[in-house]
Amino acid sequence: MKKLTLPSGEAVFIRPIQPTDAAALFAYFSSFSDLTRKRFGPHPFDEATVKAICENLDDDPCIRLAAFADGKCVAYCLLLPGILPDDDIRLKSYGIATDQFTYATYAPSVDENYHGTGLANAMFTELEYDAKKAGATHIILWGGVQHGNPRARRFYEKNGFIKVGSFDLNGGDDDMVKPLS
C-alpha cells in the first residue's frame, strides 16, 4: 500500500484490489457519469461483474489498483499483460510489428473530483513499474483515447505516450503507445 498526500492535504491510499473491495468498487462505478461510462469501458460496471472481479483475483491476469480516500474508492486502474486482439489488429494496420515487442494494456479511471491532484500520475507510476517488472517493452491504451477527451490525451502525452494511429469507434479515437526504457 502506498500513501499519497494530495495538495489539499487529503491522504489517499493506493493498493491492489482485494476480495473485500466489492462494495466500494461497485459504489465507485455507480458514481460514474454517462460520459465516464462511455470513456472507460474495459468491462461492465454492474454488481455481478464487480463481485466476479473481487472473487477471482487469484486467477486474474490483470493488475487492478484502486485508490481509497476515507474508505471510499476514488480511482481504479487496470494493467493487463499482453495486447488485446482488436488493439493488435489496429497496430498491425499502422505497420507496427507487434510480435517484436512485449505489451501491457492500460485502462485508468479517476473520480472527477480527483482530477488534477496527481493521483492519476501516482497510480500510473505504480503500474508502469509493474509493466517493466513483468517484462513489457511498451504500454498501450486499452481501446485508445477518444478525440473528445483532451484532458486524458494531455495526461497520456505528459506520461510519454505517442499517438501511433487513429480509428473510429466512439466518434474518433487514437491509439497511443508508450515505449518503456
Image (cartoon, helix red, strand yellow):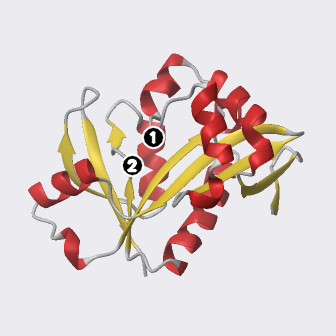
Q: In the figure, 62 relative to 38: above or below?
A: below
For the residue pair 44 and 11, the one nearer the viewer reads as 44
Indicate the amino acid at tag 1: Pro
Residue tagged by mark 1?
Answer: 42
**Side of 34 relative to 68 (left or right):** left
Q: Earlier in the sequence, mark 2 or mark 1?
A: 1
**Side of 143 relative to 154 (left or right):** left
> Quick check: marks 2 and 1 in contact, CB under 8 Å?
yes
- Which of the image's four quarters has the N terminus? bottom right
**Side of 8 relative to 74 (left or right):** right
Quadrant in which residue 179 is drawn = bottom left
Quadrant in which residue 97 is drawn = bottom left
Indicate the amino acid at tag 2: Trp
- Which of the image's four quarters has the C terminus? bottom left
Q: Position of residue 125 (x, y in %)?
A: 60, 65
Residue tagged by mark 2?
Answer: 142
